[in-house]
Image: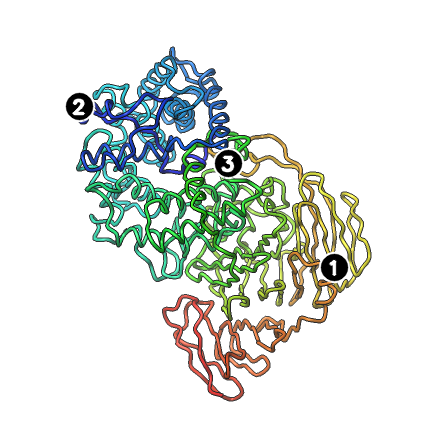
Amino acid sequence: MPVNRRTALRGGAVAAASVALAAAAHPALASDTVAAGSAPAVPASKVAATDPLKAIVVGYRELQTGINRPSAERTAALKNLGRVAKSYNDTMTVTGGPLWTDLPLGPGSDYTTSMYARLRAIAVDWGTPGGTLSGDPQVLDRIKKALELIYASQYNPQVGEIGNWYTYEIGVPYYVLHTLVTVADELTADELARYVSPIKRFVGNPNVRANSPSTVETGANRADKALISIVSGALVGDTAWVKTGIDALTDVAGGGAASLVAKLDKAGSDGFHVDGSFIQHDTIPYPGHYGIVLLTALSGAIHVTEGTEYALPEELKQKIYALVPDTFAPFVYAGALMEPVRGRMLSRQGETGHDIGHQLTVATLVLARAATGAAKAELSGLAAKWISEGTYAPFLEIPDPERFAPGPDLVATPGIEFAQEMLATHVRPTPITATHRIFGQQDRMLHVTEGWSSSLAVGSTRISRYESINGMNQHGWYVGDGVVYLFLPNAKGHYSDAYWPTVDPMLLPGATTKTGPTGALQSTPMSTKAHVGGVRWDARHGAYAMDFVSLDGTLTAKKSWFFTPAGVVCLGAGITDTSGQQVRTTIENRNLGENGRGTLLADARLVSSALGRVTSLRNPHWLHLDGAAGNVAGYVLLDKADVTALREDRTGAWRDIDTGANTKGTTDPYTRRYQKLVIEHGVKPTDAKYAYAVLPAASVVSTVASVLAWRVRANTAAVQAIRLWDNTLLANFYRADTVDEVTVSGPASVALGRSGSGWQLAVSDPTQSQDSVRVTVRRQSVEVPLKGTFGATQVVHLPR
């Protein structure tokens, strides 16, 4: 079975089991613990003062096997974990040859990570009180034999890195530690040193890449290696290695240049940014994966060192705590991470938005246990919110540890126990607050209302259109071409329910695309256009613009989105193509679920729901979808356009979009029903346009009532603008131009309206290249400084 990059659902990268140190370093550890399957090990806090290295190991065990806090949910989780662990144990052969027949041995094997992952599942269940295999001496003997077999053939100091470096330097080391620490009390000091030795070779210096010492580690990779070093050093009594791992968190060796908590103030580049952005691989927004991997490692480092002489400084911990509300929480909806910040991971069967959302929740719970005061209250409130809202994939109810994936990222008990421990204090979940926020340094935005949320995925000269590496995201051609993601209150599983293997990747909502060949996927392709960004007016309103050009350069368009409490106004202009292919803009392509039903109305007339039947709607004023699985929305056409409607079933497999060696999905077919709404622009359009509004969760009545509510003031290749009900103007200028009472000297996103007793002007530079822009309002001019603002909104109060 494949394994994805996450180390363990609900345990994250911090998850590891631990009962002992090496006998040579800490021979008394066994006397301080108890046999697996009976009572929990001595808490780390009880041993920190007398033996800090031992405390690190005991703390790491807590993150793997939990705190033995009884509950019905824990019992159910253990039962399901045991079912899978027992299956792995029953099918494992330790007399020679491969451990499992479907995972062949051999240097550079693509299956090494999966071997260690399965062994880890067995070991964790063996070491967890109440586990199916808990304390079984025969199982222990098989674990020890398997350790030696894999060491000898797969992972030892003599093997070379073949294939993905990550396997040798992060992926396998984590699983080795999980297994070793669980059974350490049953191994000799020599055996422990032997099995840790390849980790020492590949992660002895967490600051650099072992196979390329000139490559300085950054972001999630540095965090993972730091935690691996801390725990490995503690396991074998190597204090210098522990210290090296801790120093790596803030890059002591490099003078802080690659510090994990440093805030960059520029577009792109790995790490956290001052505006809340998080980038990995230089050009990919990754709060929805690598950022959480990093946070998980940081939470583990805090947890295992707390109360010891190696404890992280309070100032550093406070910076880590602050990352959760600033960078991660904004992109969580109903316990799941939003698609535009998940990069290539959206193609992983075992890592839906809900899966990675669970890992964020675990990391936040771990941090909350160490925090005090206001930080503890904030972190606990966020975790409680995600748990209470995550009804599609309940955090505490786990009927199947392979719910989303074929394994082996199994259920672990710590997340459940920490959550129940927190919930028992009657923490008040953080309420939903209206938010409009623009992250200019990663070219992402989000719009949150009390009822629904939305986000965009775009590409520019700074941020890639998509990422497709290691066999992943095989249908990712257009995911960054102006896709509008809607998150609805009664359709919380929309993107987790086999969406990516079944959706038509050529027609993603909001994107303007062509028919015909897509061209070969690239790793991280950029756009040739810098103009991508927007302006925030207030918590409920904002504008965003994209100067779009297709990857092959034949299709261009100016695209704008205007966000309000009621919906999103979408404008397109200057749509021109020379390829000779059909050009179209997708209004909607909604996943109605398996055999989903629903009613589609167009101007009060019922549209055919017959599967495969194409219906051409001539100049409709409005449409309304009352679909299955909570997919309810209205659509208002703000300019004349013919709309094509199609209800269809689509079948695909996760393997179609992820063929990675250790991540590939299954070949099992999934069929989901979709409702498409598409505007056709024809062949070789010149200056074509569109204008429509999407009204998430709107009723038929409110959809009809809004037909005349939207005032489009401009929709040209030079400027796109709308007026709000209170006369506020939202405008995106692609060059110097005028709309109504506002004139600009160059590209800008502008909002103008009343604020208190006067007028307020909000301005940003989506190109992120201008020193300033001059804005004239009713013959009053103001020069707005923009240099070094990286797309952030600048607010100017105008004289009366």
> Residue 768: horizontal and vertical position, in percent?
42, 67
Which residue matches tag 3? 350
Which residue matches tag 1? 700
Tag 2's secondary structure? loop
Residue ranking furthest to the front? 425
Q: Is residue 561 left or right of residue 126?
A: right
> Residue 38: horizontal and vertical position, in percent?
36, 22
Identify the residue at image location x=40%, y=35%. 414
Which label lies toward us, 3 or 1? 1
- The image quarter containing residue 694 is bottom right
Q: Residues within 10 Å of mark 2 (few under 14, many from 20)?
A: few
The one nearer the camera, 422 or 385, is 422
The mark tally for this picture is 3
Q: Is residue 5 visible?
A: no
Q: Residues within 10 Å of mark 3 (few under 14, many from 20)?
A: many
* Amino acid type of the residue tagged 3 in the rendering: Gly
Q: Is residue 163 left or right of residue 640?
A: left
Q: Is residue 28 above or below residue 751?
A: above
* Amino acid type of the residue tagged 2 in the rendering: Ala
Question: Which mark is first along the chain, 1 or 3?
Answer: 3
Which residue matches tag 2? 24
Q: Are marks 3 and 1 in contact (CB under 8 Å)?
A: no
Q: CA distance from mark 1 to mark 2?
A: 73 Å
Question: Which mark is first along the chain, 2 or 1?
Answer: 2
Residue ranking furthest to the top? 95
Tag 3's secondary structure? loop
Q: Residues within 10 Å of mark 1 (few under 14, many from 20)?
A: many
